[in-house]
């Protein structure tokens, strides 16, 4: 039985086929045509997947071409920014290179635009009560309808104690309670899984705020102590506001952006 | 202590993994969903997808995890070889990461199935499913590196030589380039590459050979350099692993000519530094390349250095010289190594506790001498005395053979040897007799019988004897008596046989008769005369029964008629047997004693009406008659024959009117039979019976068992 690197061994002893190089060249040249034939023949889900893959490849190729062109125009930035001290967990990240080609004027304009609004999501879709609450029939004959179940994700503080279940008007199901949120630091462009401290404001209605309903656009307070942020005076910041940027009821998680201006 | 699995299934890359799993989900779960469905149905539709994806991931990851061997469970040699080659920590980490990924995926599936339970629309459920699959995919995509690593390990593992750690093994080690691979190439068929530079062999190679009818495994190891264990590279570590963990005979190769590039001192030094690995192993110091430099030719100081190895070991190390180039001593080295290993293996086995269980069972039987007679092997006299010499081609006095004769007479093709000369026959003159193969159209071989004359004589003798005893004389007087007896036995036997035949035919026809409608026994008509006939046939005297039947009939007040009827009945029966068809007599003239009178009288009337020609009662009439009579039964199940009025019988038999002759009549009967055959088969009451029996029984369409394809219910 052949053992170890038997293919290489054989090639070393007897050499490759005389037309090996030729065959390899031809195969490489044929590859494009083959791919094209396959792409023309596939249908349905397979075609979708293939097209997506090819599109991604093309984009990648164009990007690399562009990167090569840019390198000719401007020199690459150094990996670490010397003027700001980076926290340890970001030391292994490379410096941002994608913004190279942007002129400083464009950068300025973007900053201005961002500065005009205080929060990333200034407007939200209205949510009617019957969407957020489900009526629960109570009573022995199930004819009473004053009880509500919240069908949106909620944050329930640790200190919350339920009212006697018979009298409780709003039920927040355990399955839809969230304790943590994925918060993006807009300057660091990094996301962290941070514990939620409280719901500050739900733009839909004060009732939602009171109940701790998490919908898109809700302002929450998160515990940023693990980020190690400090105020200008040198105090450690542990609570910071963030805005929910996704629809938690659709995604099964809470994503948000840290609000830096405040 | 299991080895590595022969073939591990390929490990897909992370992207392929995703494609496989997601497309399987797409293929194997329902794809059609409508927003109008009940929300519970929509929820279960999507949670099924999530669960299915999770299950598929689980299954695939499980397959990978169970395929790859757990290093701790392997033989120490294989385990540490894998450690050297693939790094145990890395390997464990990779498998561990896959295991974690599996748990994470399970967790995600659990979470999202819970969330889907709260989904209040199709859109929301779908989004949640999408998010779940996305998160699973992300987890899987992070396993790119472990998967790629495991695939590489798998490929490499499949090319590892299959080393059996427990079998008889010769292990070849030494400095690079001292002739280890040349030696293995000489003693086995392993085709190991040999090159004039160091580290040609980069991994372990295995060859197999036979010695003393046993299978031996020879392992060629890469060269080792003399430095501490920590500094050794992967290639050298493989050798060390083999040395450390295999119970084998070690062949330490040395090159005194120093062509390998290492001094004798260095080689001796290496031996001493790896000596701990040779403990409890038969070790052979093989001095190679003696075609260039022998131990004798070495200057005495260095020779003493080499010899010191053997001396220091107190006889544990044996030294041999060989040259793989001239092949001098190669086989000696092999044999010595094998013998010492065999001896040491037996020794260790004898020391162990296991041997007792084997020894208890081993018994060598040795025959006991039954007497003092010496039984020597038989040697023919001529050979023992040396009278007959061994055939020798060069000896002029040798025996003359047929071949000699052939050569003298012109050699093969010219001279043909005489095969008939050496025939052993009774008479030598017969040797060259010609015997034809076929004589008068018959094969002679068929008639050849060596004892034919004897047999003939025996026959003749017997014949004579019989004749003398008067066997062939006339003996009629006894014969007739015998014949009569025999005749009786024969006829009885024939009767028995025929009855058996009939019984057999009847039973074989059972199936044939099944679908034909049968007249129940109590409606079958049997006459007294039939019964009497049957009873006499069996051998019972029917007279008493007949008498009683007549008495009964008399008691009913039918005696006068009966008397007359009975007489006529008999005579009539006789006639009818002659003339009528079978179908008629079953129906018409067969009747009970009780009803004889009216049916009989009816027939009499009929006969009266057409005297000239015999009354032929068609089946149509008879059936009608029967149906009218069989309508009533008495308590005992018998038929009541008494009727209010006499049976109405047509004055003329119209069934046969208009028919010219008996042929036409026969034909009409035949056609009639044909026409009613189908309806009889379906057990119809008559032409007008249009009843359709239940075709779809309820039990096939009601209840739990469905439409019913099972033949049994």
Image (spheres, coloured by chain):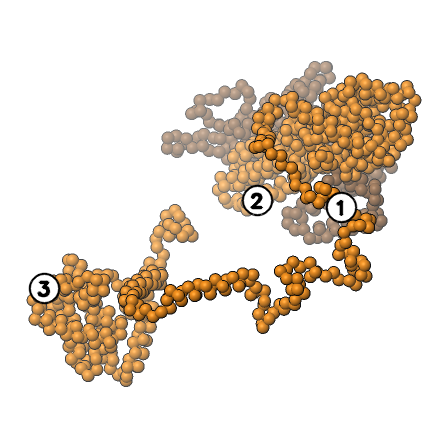
Chain colours: A brown, B orange
> In the rendering, at what x and y percent does residue B184 appear?
79, 34
**Residue B176 picture quarter:** top right
Instruction: Say whether disc 1 or disc 3 marks the residue closer to the N-terminus.
Output: 1
- Determine the residue positioned at 74% across, 51% down: A34
Q: Is residue B382 above or below residue A138?
A: below
Q: Nearer the viewer, mark 1 or mark 3?
A: 1
Question: CA separation, marks 3 and 2?
Answer: 90 Å
Q: Residues within 10 Å of mark 3 (few under 14, many from 20)?
A: few
Mark 2 lies on residue: B28
1 and 3 marks on the same chain: yes
Give how far apart the Cα atoms at labels 1 and 3 are.
Answer: 117 Å
Q: How far is the residue under mark 2 from the one under mark 1?
A: 89 Å
Residues at circles 2 and 1 in contact by the CB criterion of under 8 Å? no
Mark 3 belongs to which subunit? B
Foreground: disc 3 or disc 2: 3
Q: Earlier in the sequence, mark 3 or mark 2?
A: 2
Quick one: label 2 or label 1, which is nearer the N terminus?
Answer: 2
Q: Is residue A5 above or below residue B640?
A: above
Q: Secondary structure at mark 3?
A: helix
Count the marks: how many?
Answer: 3
Mark 1 sits on what residue?
B389
């Amino acid at each position: 039985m052949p053992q170890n690197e038997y293919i290489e061994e054989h090639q070393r002893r007897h050499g490759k086929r005389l037309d090996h190089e030729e065959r390899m060249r031809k195969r490489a040249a044929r590859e494009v045509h083959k791919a094209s034939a396959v792409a023309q023949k596939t249908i349905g889900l397979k075609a979708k997947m293939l097209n997506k893959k090819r599109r991604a490849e093309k984009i990648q190729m164009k990007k690399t071409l562009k990167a090569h062109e840019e390198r000719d125009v401007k020199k690459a930035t150094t990996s670490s920014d010397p003027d700001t001290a980076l926290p340890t967990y970001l030391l292994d990240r490379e410096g941002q290179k994608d913004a190279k080609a942007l002129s400083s004027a464009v950068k300025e304009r973007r900053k201005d635009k961002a500065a005009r609004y205080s929060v990333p999501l200034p407007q939200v879709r209205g949510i009617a009560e019957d969407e957020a609450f489900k009526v629960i029939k109570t009573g022995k004959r199930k004819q009473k309808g004053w009880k509500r179940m919240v069908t949106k994700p909620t944050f329930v503080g640790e200190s919350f104690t339920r009212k006697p279940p018979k009298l409780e008007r709003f039920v927040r199901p355990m399955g839809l309670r969230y304790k943590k949120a994925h918060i993006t630091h807009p300057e660091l462009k990094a996301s962290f899984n941070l514990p939620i401290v409280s719901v500050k404001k739900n733009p839909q209605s004060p009732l939602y705020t009171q109940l701790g309903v998490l919908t898109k656009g809700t302002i929450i307070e998160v515990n940023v102590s693990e980020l190690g942020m400090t105020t200008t005076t040198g105090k450690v910041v542990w609570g910071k506001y963030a805005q929910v940027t996704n629809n938690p009821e659709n995604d099964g998680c809470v994503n948000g952006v840290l609000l830096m201006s405040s | 202590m299991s080895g590595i699995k022969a073939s591990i299934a390929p490990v897909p890359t992370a992207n392929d993994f995703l494609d496989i799993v997601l497309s399987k989900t797409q293929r194997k779960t329902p794809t059609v969903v409508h927003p109008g469905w009940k929300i519970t149905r929509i929820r279960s539709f999507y949670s099924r997808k999530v669960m299915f994806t999770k299950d598929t991931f689980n299954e695939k990851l499980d397959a990978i995890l169970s395929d790859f061997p757990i290093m701790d469970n392997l033989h120490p040699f294989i385990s540490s070889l894998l450690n050297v080659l693939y790094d145990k920590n890395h390997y464990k980490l990779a498998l561990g990461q896959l295991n974690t990924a599996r748990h994470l995926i399970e967790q995600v599936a659990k979470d999202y199935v819970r969330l889907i339970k709260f989904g209040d629309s199709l859109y929301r459920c779908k989004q949640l499913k999408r998010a779940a699959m996305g998160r699973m995919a992300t987890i899987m995509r992070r396993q790119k590196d472990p998967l790629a690593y495991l695939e590489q390990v798998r490929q490499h593992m499949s090319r590892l030589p299959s080393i059996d750690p427990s079998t008889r093994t010769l292990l070849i080690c030494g400095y690079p380039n001292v002739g280890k691979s040349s030696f293995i190439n000489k003693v086995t068929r392993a085709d190991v590459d040999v090159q004039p530079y160091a580290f040609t062999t980069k991994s372990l190679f295995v060859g197999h050979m036979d010695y003393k009818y046993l299978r031996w495994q020879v392992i060629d190891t890469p060269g080792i350099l003399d430095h501490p264990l920590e500094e050794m590279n992967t290639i050298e570590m493989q050798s060390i692993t083999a040395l450390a963990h295999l119970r084998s005979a070690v062949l330490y190769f040395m090159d005194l000519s120093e062509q390998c590039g290492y001094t004798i001192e260095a080689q001796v030094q290496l031996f001493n530094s790896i000596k701990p690995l040779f403990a409890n192993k038969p070790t052979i110091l093989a001095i190679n390349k003696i075609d260039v430099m022998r131990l004798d030719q070495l200057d005495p100081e260095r020779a003493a250095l080499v010899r010191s190895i053997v001396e220091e070991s107190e006889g544990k190390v044996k030294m041999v010289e060989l040259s793989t180039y001239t092949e001098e001593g190669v086989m000696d080295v092999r044999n010595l190594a094998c013998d010492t290993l065999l001896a040491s293996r037996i020794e260790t086995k004898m020391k162990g506790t296991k041997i007792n269980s084997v020894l208890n069972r081993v018994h060598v039987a040795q025959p006991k001498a039954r007497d003092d007679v010496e039984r020597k092997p038989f040697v023919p006299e001529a050979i023992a005395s040396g009278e007959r010499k061994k055939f020798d081609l060069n000896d002029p006095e040798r025996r003359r053979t047929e071949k000699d004769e052939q050569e003298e007479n012109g050699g093969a093709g010219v001279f043909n040897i005489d095969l008939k000369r050496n025939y052993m026959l009774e008479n030598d003159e017969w040797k060259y007799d010609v015997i034809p193969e076929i004589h008068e159209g018959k094969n002679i071989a068929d008639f050849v019988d060596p004892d034919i004359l004897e047999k003939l004589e025996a026959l003749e003798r017997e014949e004579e004897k019989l004749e003398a005893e008067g066997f062939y004389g006339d003996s009629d007087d006894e014969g007739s008596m015998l014949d009569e007896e025999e005749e009786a036995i024969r006829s009885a036997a024939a009767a028995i046989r025929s009855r058996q035949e009939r019984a057999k035919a009847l039973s074989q026809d059972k199936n044939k008769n099944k679908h034909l409608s049968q007249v129940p026994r109590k409606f079958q008509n049997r006459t007294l005369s039939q019964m009497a006939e049957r009873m006499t046939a069996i051998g019972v005297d029917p007279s008493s029964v007949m008498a009683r039947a007549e008495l009964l009939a008399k008691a009913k007040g039918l005696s006068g008629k009966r008397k007359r009827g009975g007489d006529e009945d008999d005579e009539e029966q006789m006639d009818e047997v002659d003339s009528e068809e079978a179908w008629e007599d079953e129906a018409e003239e067969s009747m009970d004693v009780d009803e004889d009178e009216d049916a009989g009288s009816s027939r009499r009337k009929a006969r009266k009406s057409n005297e000239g020609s015999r009354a032929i009662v068609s089946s149509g009439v008879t059936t009608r008659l029967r149906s009218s009579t069989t309508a009533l039964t008495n308590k005992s199940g018998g038929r009541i024959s008494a009727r209010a009025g006499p049976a109405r019988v047509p004055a003329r038999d119209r069934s046969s009117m208009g028919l010219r002759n008996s042929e036409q009549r026969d034909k009409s009967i035949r056609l009639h039979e044909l026409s009613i055959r189908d309806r009889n088969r379906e057990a119809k009451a008559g032409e007008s019976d249009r009843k359709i029996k239940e075709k779809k029984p309820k039990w096939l369409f009601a209840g739990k068992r469905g439409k019913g394809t099972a033949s049994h219910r």
